[in-house]
Amino acid sequence: MTSNEIGKETLKNTLDNILANSVSRAGGVPGVVAMVTDCEGNIYEGAAGVRDSSTQQPMTTDTVFCLFSTTKALTGSMLMKMVEEGKVRLDDPVKEYVPEMADIMVLEGFDPDGQPKLSKPKTDVTINMLMLHTAGFGYEFFSTKDRKYREAKDVPPIMASSFDAVKSVLLFEPGERWNYGANIDWVGKVVENVYGMRLGEAMKREIFTPLDMSDIGFSLSPSMTERRATIHTRDQEGKLTPNPHIILPQPPEMDMGGHGLYGSIGEYMKFIRMILNDGSGVLKPETVSKMAQNGLGDLKSGGWVSSDPTVANDGEFFPGFPKSWSYTFQVNETPLPTGRPAGQLMWAGLANLFYWIDRENGIGGFWSTQIFPYQDPSSYVGYLEFESAVYQHLKK
């Protein structure tokens, strides 16, 4: 055995144990798939536990997950591709491409009858604001005001996967601050209207085919359906219940650029490698460099407060460490306790999926479970252990 082979074997044993412990510990996760890649290819692939606790079907590395907000980075890449091509500019008003944006109002509050008090925004929402989550949109599970507005105006929930579901309200004047919300669904609509095709078709042409990503899409194929992991919900006592009925509409009325993709994790690793390799085959190096830089200026990205404890817990990644936002990732501005250096990229998905992309060291990883609510203590701790172990290995 060469020293390189021994190193890989050590890494595999360490990470396999972390996955196994995440499943077997009290209050653990039903199942997990996790992978690590360098610039060349995956250096670790692992699976532990089950796809569904009622059927006991084993979790495998080709299991299909609802990718939720890890979808955003691919939609952001599509937008940046159009910037490269001169089809859009980041400072363009969104209404030039999606006229319905002109009808979106700012929420000033509610009258005594619970009806929204609205005003016209003083500033146009730009593509840049959508990409950086400064437009003013929220999510109903992270905002009581957004939830109340949707109820008053009969706006469908965001998981309805329809254009009506994103036509909510601005929680503040555009550009005022950072707030995580339905922005990238609007970006997806910009992509569709410029290219004249569904977002999934555009992604297939511009990203999936060049990167040989086939086991991914907004609609589940029969094979993907067979391998789909069930979303479990954890109650206040910590008990997990499988919910096979929790599934995004198939086929979706709208390809949701903010959360709509299903895929196996190996396919997502190809996208992570593309970013590690400065856009190889998809984007120009200078585009990827721009995508990795803080776009918020003096503003910061932060945590979230849940307005629906069945879907999300309150939380924040690495509280106390300053974080900004790029196109379209969170950027840690200082080194993290896991070992990740400053200026690197990460984000997550609602059912407790977490990834990071470290362009400095040429390494990235993905930790994937299917559990509500978001920021599940067991899954998130497993992810932190996983990332930390990868950096401990790098030091050796």
Image: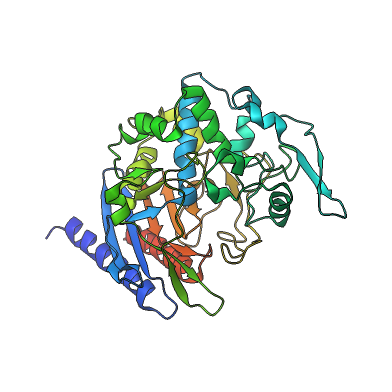
- Name the residue: 63% across, 57% down: 304
Query: Residue 131's spot in the image, x, y percent?
Result: 58, 37
Query: Residue 238's spot in the image, x, y percent?
Result: 50, 77
Q: Is residue 36 left or right of residue 27?
A: left
- Name the residue: 46% across, 59% down: 246
Q: How is the image coloured?
A: rainbow
Res. 23 image quadrant: bottom left
Q: How many marks?
A: 0
- Please name whichever residue, 156 or 279, is drawn nearer the observer in this view of the structure: 156
Query: Residue most toward the top?
Result: 86
- Name the residue: 59% across, 24% down: 97
Residue 332 in sight here: no
Tell me: residue 321, above or below residue 165: below
- Please name whichever residue, 203 or 129, is drawn nearer the observer in this view of the structure: 203
Query: Residue 305's spot in the image, x, y percent?
Result: 66, 60
Query: Residue 373's spot in the image, x, y percent?
Result: 53, 65
- Name the residue: 42% across, 81% down: 26
Residue 242 in sight here: yes
* Quarter of the image that includes the N terminus: bottom left
Q: Is residue 35 left or right of residue 340?
A: left
Res. 99 image quadrant: top right
* Quarter of the image that includes the C terminus: bottom left
- Please name whichever residue, 181 or 46, is drawn nearer the observer in this view of the structure: 181
- Please name whichever residue, 387 or 348, is drawn nearer the observer in this view of the structure: 348
Tell me: residue 19, above or below residue 277: below
Res. 18 image quadrant: bottom left
Query: Residue most toward the left?
Result: 1
Query: Residue most toward the right?
Result: 112
